[in-house]
Image: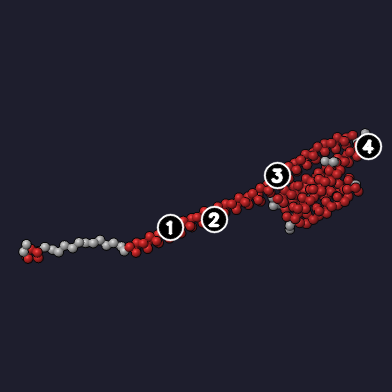
Amino acid sequence: MDQSEETLKPDVQEEIPDTPPVAATEQAFERESRVGCFLKAATRWLFGLLIVFGLGALTVIFLLYTPTRETLENTQANLDAANQKITDLENQVQTLSALEPKNAALQKEVDAGNLHIKILTALADVNNARVALAEGDPAAAQSALANTTAALKQVATLAGSSQSEAVNFIQDRLDLVLGEIETDTATAQSDLVVMATKLLELEKALFGQ
């Protein structure tokens, strides 16, 4: 080959593709790894917070709502039983009252029946007030106790001096409740429980139930 042919051939240069430097690739990979780790950690924290919140909600339900509901159900059951007793005793009193002119000795039974009715009426008033306060209605609770003072006065008259101390204690507690209903419902609820207990004790002492 002569020199002229060599000059006619173009110089062929191999094109080498541009490749990113290894260090830049590693840095990009590290950045993506950090972002991925952050997202995973954030996801775990989010699920953790959701679990804690759910457990807290369940705790509130079991510790607050469930006991209050059970108390209301028990109080309502006691109230229904007391109302049934009142109905039965009123029927007995009506029967005895019809015989009163024929036998003066029946007067004691009539008085005993009336006394029992008044005690149970006062107890029903107290339980109605407890239910109203548990439902957050102080006005309804005060209304439920509107006639309780009169009922307790009749209890004091019919029970006689032997039970005057117990009746006076219940009346004093009622006065406290009437002053607390609007300002301190928690204390009023507690005093109502004491009243209900004392009325049940009075009924048991007089009628052995």
Q: Which residue is mark 3?
A: 73
Mark 2 touches mark 1? (CB < 8 Å): no
Mark 4 touches mark 3? (CB < 8 Å): no
Q: Are there few (<14), some (14-19), or many (20+) residues within 10 Å of tag 2? A: few
- Find residue 49 and name its label: 2
| Residue type, label 3 | Glu
Q: Is residue 207 above or below residue 184?
A: above
Q: Which residue is mark 1?
A: 36
Secondary structure of the residue carrying numbered label 4: loop
Mark 2 touches mark 4? (CB < 8 Å): no
Q: Nearer the viewer, mark 2 or mark 4?
A: 2
| Residue type, label 4 | Ala
| Residue type, label 1 | Gly
Q: Which residue is mark 4?
A: 104
Could you tell me residue 134's position as x and y percent? Answer: 70, 50
Q: Is residue 75 left or right of residue 60?
A: right
- Which is nearer the N-term, disc 4 or disc 3? 3
Q: Nearer the viewer, mark 2 or mark 1?
A: 1
**Residue at x-position 93% and y-position 37%:** 105
| Residue type, label 2 | Leu
- Which is nearer the N-term, disc 2 or disc 1? 1
Could you tell me residue 94's position as x and y percent? Answer: 85, 36
Query: Residue 22's quadrant in the figure?
Result: bottom left
Distance from disc 3 to disc 2, alpha carbons, whole Å, reads 35 Å
Q: Is residue 25 left or right of residue 71?
A: left
Could you tell me residue 20's position as x and y percent? Answer: 30, 62
